[in-house]
Structure formats: structure tokens, C-alpha cells
Image: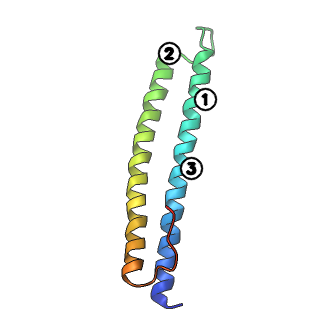
């Protein structure tokens, strides 16, 4: 394997890993969103329970996190596609990457 091919293989692996980690992070935020829903169902204005205001703040922060993660994921997927394209142009793409 040439140095160039090794370099691009590493780039492709890192790009795939980034996409996967962002996808995992988005799954985590969605799980947190479901947990907030569960906590809010238990809110009966008893001491120690999450207030409606705090719940809405949490939802807003989670919406922002989801938006940011989706934007980051779009950038990461575009980068992974760019690496794949460069590998094809250089004749280094032995396999089609699933991103």
C-alpha cells in the first residue's frame, strides 16, 4: 500500500468515525429529550420536581443541541464524501464507503 493510499485510508476512517460519533450524539440528545418528557409528566408542583419553566428551558436547549448536531453531521458527511471522491479520482477507492 502506498503512502498516499494509507493517508487516504486514514482520512476515510476518521471521517466515518466522526459521522458515527455525531450520529451517536444525536441519538443521545433524543434519549435525553424523551427523559425530559418523562420528568415533565411527573410535574405536579411538588417541591423537588422540575418546574414548567425549567422544563421549557431544557427543551429549548435540547432543540439547539439537535440543530447544532444536525449541522455538524451535514458537514461531516460532506467531508466523508469529499474524501471518497478524492480517493476515486486518485484510483485509491477499493470499496464503496457507507456513510
How would you rate the neighbour count of disc 1 (Cα within 10 Å): few for under 14, some for 14-19, many for 20 or more?
few
Dot in front, 3 or 2: 3
- Residues under labels 2 and 1: Cα distance? 15 Å
Sooner in the amino-acid sequence: mark 2 or mark 1: 1
Sooner in the amino-acid sequence: mark 3 or mark 2: 3
In the picture of the structure, the residue carrying the numbered disc 2 is 52
In the picture of the structure, the residue carrying the numbered disc 3 is 24
In the picture of the structure, the residue carrying the numbered disc 1 is 35
Q: Tell me what residue is drawn at x 46 percent, y 17 percent.
A: 53
Furthest toward the bottom, the residue is 2
How would you rate the neighbour count of disc 3 (Cα within 10 Å): few for under 14, some for 14-19, many for 20 or more?
few
Find numbered disc 3 in the image and state the secondary structure of the residue it sits on: helix
Q: Tell me what residue is drawn at x 51 percent, y 44 percent.
A: 26
Find numbered disc 2 in the image and state the secondary structure of the residue it sits on: helix
Q: Quadrant of the image for the N terminus?
A: bottom right
Q: Tell me what residue is drawn at x 43 percent, y 34 percent.
A: 63
Q: Tell me what residue is drawn at x 63 percent, y 15 percent.
A: 42
Dot in front, 2 or 1: 1
- Residues under labels 1 and 3: Cα distance? 17 Å
Residue 97 in percent (x, y) is at 50, 68
Amino acid at each position: 500500500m502506498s503512502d498516499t493510499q494509507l493517508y487516504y485510508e486514514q482520512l476515510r476512517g476518521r471521517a466515518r468515525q466522526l459521522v458515527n460519533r455525531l450520529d451517536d450524539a444525536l441519538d443521545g440528545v433524543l434519549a435525553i429529550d424523551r427523559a425530559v418528557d418523562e420528568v415533565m409528566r411527573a410535574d405536579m408542583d411538588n417541591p423537588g420536581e422540575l418546574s414548567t419553566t425549567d422544563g421549557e428551558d431544557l427543551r429549548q436547549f435540547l432543540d439547539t443541541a439537535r440543530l447544532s448536531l444536525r449541522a455538524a453531521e451535514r458537514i461531516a458527511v460532506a467531508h466523508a464524501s469529499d474524501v471518497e471522491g478524492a480517493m476515486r479520482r486518485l484510483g485509491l477507492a477499493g470499496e464503496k464507503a457507507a456513510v
